[in-house]
Image (cartoon, rainbow, N blue to C red):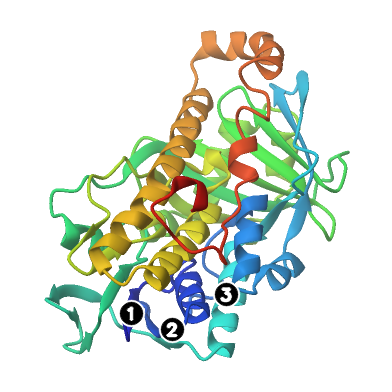
């Protein structure tokens, strides 16, 4: 193994390159955009397992420095009933971070460690062990990693019949409101309003950050969403959340220039093939659970590091890929299944909305305890120094 070509320079791509560098394997990141994607994207959460994975590649402290810890969570229903959500006391907080800040930290760390990143290189085909880009250039590789997101080109090259991403029926919108909420600085509130779901948390510098999963009649790309006038989005947000407390106040006190419309929310169904020949998928290209999981970025980071472990320890590339998939598929699909159930509640009808606040306290004490749901997810740690073997107890 002398060179790995990584397609995609978002989150999974730089982490894969950093983990491969730590494993002693050279990699180049090929990014389709003509320049670094600073300022692109909304806010995401890094779970404790994701933060622990970043420690392996030396990026955790820099990420935490630009993130905001969130250690308390609550759920509200139409502003009337509130349920404090129990957490795991021994794993540390979630960290809320702007995707652009996470991207910048990972990009800077990759550059600092001498990893080469080439921009304006959009992959269109693979010929044996040669990557072909739309500008006519080519690159040789021993392994090609598809870290090119939910609309992955590499996934199509591996399996032309692979299912594509599935739209959730919602759009992602967020903003910064001047309205202050009477909450603990490390609180995050999941609110089920009269017509839609939203969440909010106190902003570090004052005011309140909010995000909504806005029900919409058709999917929109990021470009299409940004073509809609901001005033039209604000009108739709007021119509959907204006009667909620504090949703209405949050929207009404949000400057239009702070509004970010990130386009449609997608999830990836289970795909049959994660690899073929010397091509393999990582991150959202292979598994993209709903944002309801709170694990999307963390799972991508984990997969990047586990792939590097497998390539480090298993010389036979197909067997390394098979071992990597065995290590990851069950875990990521369990998270996706849990998040799918949450998605149904976000778009619940009036009967379900009435029953949810009545049933939720009981569910929290039985089938939805943190130990049953998020415990196995957040306590997961990658044993980087242990060799990858066929023994499940050692991987």
Which is more toward the observer, 168 or 131? 131
Local secondary structure at mark 2: loop
Local secondary structure at mark 1: strand
Compared across the picture, whether 269 is left or right of 40 comes to: left
Task: Pinpoint residue 246: horizontal percent, then vertical percent.
Answer: 75, 33
Task: Pinpoint residue 82: horizontal percent, then vertical percent.
Answer: 77, 22
Q: Which residue is mark 2?
A: 35
Whether residue 100 is situated above or below residue 45 in the rendered picture: below
Whether residue 247 is situated above or below residue 260 in the rendered picture: above
| Residue drawn where x is 63% and y is 22% of the image | 368
Whether residue 128 is situated above or below residue 265 in the rendered picture: below
Disc sitting over residue 106 in the figure: 3
Q: Which quarter of the rendered picture does the N terminus lie within?
A: bottom left
| Residue drawn where x is 43% and y is 49% of the image | 391
Task: Pinpoint residue 62: horizontal percent, then vertical percent.
Answer: 71, 73
| Residue drawn where x is 61% and y is 14% of the image | 356
Of badges 2 and 1, the one in the foreground is 1
Mark 2 vs 3, N-terminal side: 2
How far apart, in angstroms, are the residues tagged by discs 2 and 3?
Answer: 15 Å
Local secondary structure at mark 3: helix
Within-10-Å neighbours for mark 1: few <14, some 14–19, many 20+: many
Compared across the picture, whether 122 is left or right of 214 comes to: left
Disc sitting over residue 311 in the figure: none
Q: Which residue is mark 1?
A: 4
Which is more toward the observer, 217 or 297? 297
Residue 215 visible in the current orientation: no
């Amino acid at each position: 193994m002398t060179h790995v070509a990584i397609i995609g320079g978002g989150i999974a791509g730089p982490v894969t390159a950093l983990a491969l560098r730590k494993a002693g394997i050279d990699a180049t990141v090929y990014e389709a955009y003509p320049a670094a994607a600073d300022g692109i994207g909304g806010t995401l959460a890094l779970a404790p397992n994701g933060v622990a994975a970043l420690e392996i590649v030396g990026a955790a402290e820099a990420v935490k420095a630009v993130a905001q810890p969130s250690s308390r969570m609550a759920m509200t229903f139409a502003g009337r009933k509130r349920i404090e959500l129990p957490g795991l006391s021994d794993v540390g907080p979630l960290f809320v971070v702007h995707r652009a800040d996470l991207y910048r930290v990972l990009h800077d760390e990759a550059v600092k460690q001498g990893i080469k990143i080439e921009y304006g290189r959009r992959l269109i085909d693979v010929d044996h062990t040669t990557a072909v880009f739309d500008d006519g250039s080519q690159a040789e590789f021993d392994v090609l990693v598809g870290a090119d997101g939910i609309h992955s080109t590499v996934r199509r090259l591996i399996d032309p019949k692979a299912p594509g991403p599935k739209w959730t029926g919602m759009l992602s919108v967020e903003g910064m409101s001047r309205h202050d909420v009477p909450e603990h600085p490390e609180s995050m509130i999941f609110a089920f309003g009269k017509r839609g779901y939203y969440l909010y948390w106190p902003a570090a510098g004052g005011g309140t950050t909010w995000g909504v999963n806005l029900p919409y009649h058709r999917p929109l790309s990021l470009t299409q969403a940004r073509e809609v006038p901001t005033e039209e989005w604000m009108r739709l947000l007021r119509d959907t959340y204006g009667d909620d407390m504090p949703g209405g106040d949050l929207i009404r006190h949000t400057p239009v220039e702070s509004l970010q419309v990130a386009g449609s929310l997608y999830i990836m169904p289970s795909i049959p093939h994660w690899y073929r020949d010397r091509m393999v998928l990582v991150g959202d290209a292979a598994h993209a659970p709903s944002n309801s999981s709170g694990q999307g970025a963390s799972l991508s980071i984990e997969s990047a590091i586990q792939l590097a472990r497998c390539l480090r320890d298993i010389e036979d590339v197909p067997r390394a890929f098979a071992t990597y998939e065995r290590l990851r598929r069950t875990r990521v699909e369990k998270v996706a299944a849990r998040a799918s159930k949450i998605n149904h509640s976000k778009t619940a009808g009036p009967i379900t909305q009435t029953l949810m606040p009545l049933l939720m306290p009981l569910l929290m004490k039985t089938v939805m305890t943190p130990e049953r749901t998020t415990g196995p997810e957040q306590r997961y740690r990658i044993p980087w120094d242990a060799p990858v073997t066929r023994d499940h107890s050692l991987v």
